[in-house]
Amino acid sequence: MEKEYKISVTSSTKNLHKIRNFIEETALNSGISREKTDEIILAVDEACTNIIKYTYKYEEKHKISIKIKNKDNKLIVEIIYRGKGFDPNKVKSPDMKEYFKNYKVGGLGIPLMRKFVNKIEYNFIKPNLNKLILVKQI
């Protein structure tokens, strides 16, 4: 039987630890290895940080909801939020030689997400309602 786990928090970086703990507990209790759990945590943390920073502009009055399902040997994390949508699949990966040559800081979150999950989907559900789906093969 497929189980679904949910959490909803206000859009504050102070709540990122709640999200990380939720992902960790759910993944480990689902029998996922520590290594893959840590990868999922990093990807979800980066996605939620981007939502807090870029969509909500650090306004703490908004909500971020997360659902986790373990289905067909995959952990599926759905991040649901309101506001301006953003599809990470449209962001090009940086040229790392150029990145380091120019002493850049930041901008590596989406490439990290791509590295740690097998699939990223973005769904525009209706005006101002978005769903970012991260899929990790387990």
Image (cartoon, rainbow, N blue to C red):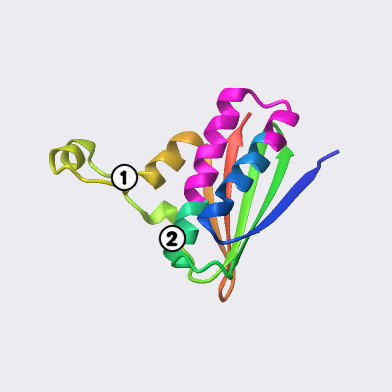
Q: Badge 2 local density, few (<14 within 10 Å), some, or many (20+)?
A: some
| Left or right: 104, with 88 as reference point | left
- The answer to whether the residues at label 2 and label 1 have Cβ atoms under 8 Å apart is no
- Residue ranking furthest to the bottom: 127
x then y, percent, for residue 101: 13, 38
Residue 27 included in the magenta stretch of the image: yes
Q: What amino acid is at disc 1?
A: Ser
Which is more toward the observer, 46 or 68?
46
Q: Secondary structure at mark 2?
A: helix
**Residue at left 44%, top 40%?**
114
Query: What's the distance in space between the residues labelled 2 and 1, CA to CA?
Result: 20 Å
**Residue at left 67%, top 42%?**
22
| Left or right: 136, with 4 as reference point | left
From the viewer's perspective, is residue 26 above or below residue 68? above
**Camera-nearest label, 2 or 1:** 2
Q: Secondary structure at mark 1?
A: loop
Which is more toward the observer, 61 or 103?
61
- Residue ranking furthest to the front: 14
Q: Any mark on residue 123, and which?
A: none
x then y, percent, for residue 31: 72, 25
**Span highlighted in magenta in the image:** 25-47
Q: Which residue is mark 2?
A: 53
**Residue at left 42%, top 63%?**
54
x then y, percent, for residue 138: 63, 28
Q: Which residue is mark 1?
A: 93
Tag count in the figure? Answer: 2
Q: What amino acid is at disc 2?
A: Lys
Quarter-of-image position of residue 37:
top right
Q: Badge 1 local density, few (<14 within 10 Å), some, or many (20+)?
A: some
x then y, percent, for residue 2: 81, 41
